[in-house]
Image (spheres, coloured by chain):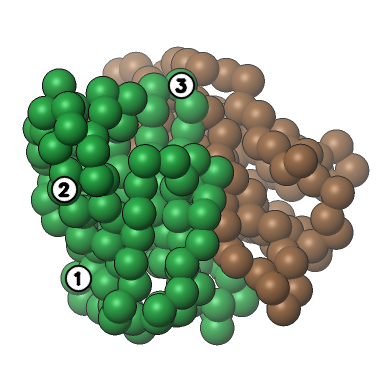
Amino acid sequence: AQKITQTQPGMFVQEKEAVTLDCTYDTSDQSYGLFWYKQPSSGEMIFLIYQGSYDEQNATEGRYSLNFQKARKSANLVISASQLGDSAMYFCAMREWAGSSNTGKLIFGQGTTLQVKP
Amino acid sequence: NAGVTQTPKFRVLKTGQSMTLLCAQDMNHEYMYWYRQDPGMGLRLIHYSVGEGTTAKGEVPDGYNVSRLKKQNFLLGLESAAPSQTSVYFCASTPPSKGWTEAFFGQGTRLTVV
């Protein structure tokens, strides 16, 4: 069964430093997609970054990058130059590709709470 | 664009009461989903729809019903609310035409069943 694991319930980082949030996944499919979402205290789910299983380059979006290691089945989120506004819960999610019967369902990890210290 | 809009944002129900959560999207997306979020468990899929008039069960469908009579709306119903359904509910939509690389969420509905 597909599964996403985020082993860090909580993380601290000093402002302006980089931080890595871990995500490992389990799937037998060759084709899948990996997402990271940010959930601030206000509660909404904010899309950060996407990585496809066949993408050769690691995805980047501004200060966010995804360290994709396919053989290790890991998709860690790297936030560079942390800001106080980065304090939030972060979720890793996976979408499996089922070809013509794809449903687009997402499987989520348990989340990691990040606190940025001034 | 409004994106994905959920109504209401907050609700308190008594055990046994019924209610309907509305999700509306203005992006013409074919696929829509209802998830629930509980502490320490991430988001779990309740029901989903791959198009107008179609619905299917997700991971935790018991106690919920859904309908998709119009492409832009996806309704989640609780016929007889139970305290175990206290949760934050999220609606999401996806356009398959974008290669499944996007998924947009509503702002969430915080439901408390007492």
Residue where numbered disc 1 is placed = B2
Quadrant in the picture for residue B63:
top left
Relative side of B107 to A3, left or right: left
What amino acid is found at the position of numbered circle 2 in the picture? Met
Mark 1 vs mark 2: same chain?
A: yes
Q: Which shade of the palette goes to chain A?
A: brown
Write the residue at 30% across / 31% down.
B85
Residue B68 x/y as whole percent? 34, 72
Residue under label 2:
B19
Which residue has dot 3 on it?
Answer: B40
Q: Residue at x 14, y 56 (%)?
A: B7
Q: Image quadrant of residue B32?
A: bottom left
- For the residues labelled 1 and 3, the Cα–Cα distance comes to 30 Å
Q: Residue at x 48, y 27 (%)?
A: B41
The answer to whether A75 appears left or right of A110 in the picture is right
Q: Nearer the viewer, mark 1 or mark 2?
A: 2
